[in-house]
Amino acid sequence: MLKIENLHVSVAGKEILKGLDLAVRPGEVHAIMGPNGAGKSTLGNVLAGRDGYEITAGTVDFGDKDLLQLEPEERAAEGLFLAFQYPVEIPGVNNTYFLKAALNAQRKYRGESELDSMQFLKLVREKLRVLHISDELLHRAVNAGFSGGEKKRNEIFQMALLEPRVAILDETDSGLDIDALKMVAEGVNHMRSPERAFVVITHYQRLLDYIVPDYVHVLAEGRIVESGDKTLAHKLEQHGYAWLDERRVPERATP
Amino acid sequence: MATEHNDIETALNRRYEAGFVTDIETEYLPPGLSEDVIRELSAKKHEPQWMTDWRLKAYRHWLTMPVPEWAKLKIGPIDFQAISYYAAPKARPKSLAEVDPKLLETYDKLGVPLHERAKLAGVAVDAVFDSVSVGTTFRKELAEAGVIFCSLSEAIQEHPELVQKYLSSVVPIGDNYFAALNCAVFSDGSFVFIPKGVRCPMELSTYFRINAVNTGQFERTLIIAEEGSYVSYLEGCTAPQRDENQLHAAVVELVALDDAQIKYSTVQNWYPGDENGVGGIYNFVTKRGDCRGARSKISWTQVETGSAITWKYPSCVLRGDDSTGEFYSVALTHHAQQADTGTKMIHIGRNTKSKIISKGISAGRGQNSYRGLVKVEKSASGARNYTQCDSLLIGKKCGAHTFPYIEVKHPSAIVEHEATTSKISDDQLFYCRSRGLGEEDAVSMIVDGFCKQVFKELPMEFAVEAKKLLEVSLEGAVG
Ligand SMILES: Nc1ncnc2c1ncn2[C@@H]1O[C@H](COP(=O)(O)OP(=O)(O)OP(=O)(O)O)[C@@H](O)[C@H]1O
Ligand SMILES: [Mg+2]
């Protein structure tokens, strides 16, 4: 459902992604690991449609759509969701109000009827129950004054409510205490379905104990340099990324 | 794409919904300003001699005054001889039932129905069309409560003792250039009197409409709240879309006696001019409230989205001990609009309190200045002020400026001032859009959040209206 081919992306004249390939099918969970500055967030941002990235080559198909041609809000309505590494604060805008507007904008785009306040609140309660989030966060302004962990939980809550087809989680586990980590994992696992896929960007094998991935990829120097099953994550945890470099040296030597 | 085209078209049409002209037979005074013109104006209104004399005195004073230039505004020269100082629909009905259907239709279109069937529930309206009041709703109900709500012209005829006692008791005739001009030529406006101990049973509101071409609107409002009374008053304004600048120079005076409260809300949506700054209303307004009595309270809330130029400083003179003044403001400038607005809080009585919340939004090439004075006199022991002044910039060509003046003459005063300037960040916009919100919806949501503190001071229907206005005014501000 999400097919990335030969993606080249530059930021401020510097090439970050250098021919990235990735295919995600419905029902799959892909974990992406890789050193700092490798381009993981860049990938998430480019997929979600953020400005400021120059796509110099490559294609991204999302279902039957050419993803790169769509505006960010269209990508969202088509079912793409990005949980941000650093969610932003929007002072004065009530969290619930924000989500209702977002959900209804998506529904409108898809030609579905908009939810009224009662229907929306019912949905909210349903999701809260599953995620064990206190509704106190819902009465506050979007992310305003939230702790790091609360922001991440809020991202997962948004994901649960918006029910995307593909969710990209960018280091949603970073900065979480162990309970919050479990909650995030539960949220994801609860949403796993044959129709839905996840791309989980993380630095830690620990998250993958809770969200068991079908595939683990290593993104380094702008490419997927290694793919494997969940055991790859364990190897990385033991050996670090240097281990990969060593393995890749012979390849590089060949012109 | 066809749909996209439609969207743009609706957006364009929506831009200034109040921009239409009502085709109605109008009686004008020829353009020009002189003592004779003022006498004629006064005669047309059958005013008593004291009123005519008062006007002439103001006019003579005005002639000696220089045009003020201290505001951070670029104002083209105003030719006072090219303006007509009186324009009124020819037919002069005796009651609302006789008002020209075209006028009723105009107010319907503006969302302020006047006729019996559709009157706004719980809001009494005085409708001022060009230079005259064309009708006031709910008069009977108000009279039963002892409240006087009528046009100022009528009040001059029917309650001269009240008018003489309070008129220019808050804003003296020589107060400033535009106030003096207003005294000389004001044509109508609203008069409100809430007697002792009465809580006004409904919201009162005046809807000002400029329709005629080449005229100025000089209205004047006087609100008196006697001991222990309460009133909430709303003011709305619109004008047709024209290429010439039109002058609007109003004066509003509020008097609150012991324990009285006046809440005054404005949604100002005069025609702002086009993208290039052609046309639009010059809005020069003097608004001042006198907390004359102990424990009295005056609260100004304004949402200023219209006008090519806004020059306005709703102020409170905190004379009574323990009196309170508040000012909540949202001022938006887009395209080539300019606003220099703020407030003055003059602390005279003991333990007087004031609060200022100002939110300036600039987009396009809009220039937005906050100018505020907090003055604590020697007599004002225990005075407190809190000022919060936030600016939001949308785009790179606009400007926001803050001019706070603080004069403290009593050592016990506590004056706090906080100011912030922020931009709608790309991060915020992208965050909203990645959740499915369109760009303009995202901007208006962020702006709405920014204005929250002020909007919550507005009566419910007005808050909704104000939010919509901001959305429309900001169309095309990003992208
Ligand atoms: N706007 C920008 N201007 C210049 N360089 C940028 C910009 N955005 C990203 N980069 C650079 O692109 C590279 C990839 O950044 P990215 O955020 O995608 O890394 P990452 O893999 O997510 O790292 P981390 O694990 O630390 O989150 C980094 O070297 C970063 O400095
Ligand atoms: Mg990152």
Image: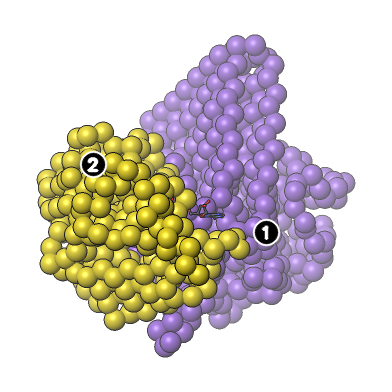
Chain colours: A yellow, B purple
Callout 1 amino acid: Lys
Asked where in the image residue A161 lies, by quadrant, the reply is: bottom left
Query: Residue at 40% across / 51% down in the picture?
Result: A246
Instruction: For mark 2, give the secondary structure.
Output: helix
Chain under label 1? B
Asked where in the image residue B131 lies, by quadrant, the reply is: bottom right
Name the residue carrying label 2: A206
Q: Is B421 left or right of A128, judged from the image as shown?
A: right
**What is the number of the mark on residue B49?**
none
Query: Residue at 40% across / 67% down in the picture?
Result: A20
Q: Check the image and name the residue furthest to the bottom.
A: B2
Q: Position of residue B248 (x, y in %)?
A: 66, 58
The residue mark sitting in front, 1 or 2, is: 2
Query: Residue at 82% across / 61% down in the picture?
Result: B77
Residue in front for this viewpoint, B80 or B361: B361
Q: Is A43 left or right of B356, judged from the image as shown?
A: left
Chain under label 2? A
Q: Position of residue B435 (x, y in %)?
A: 34, 60
Name the residue carrying label 1: B397
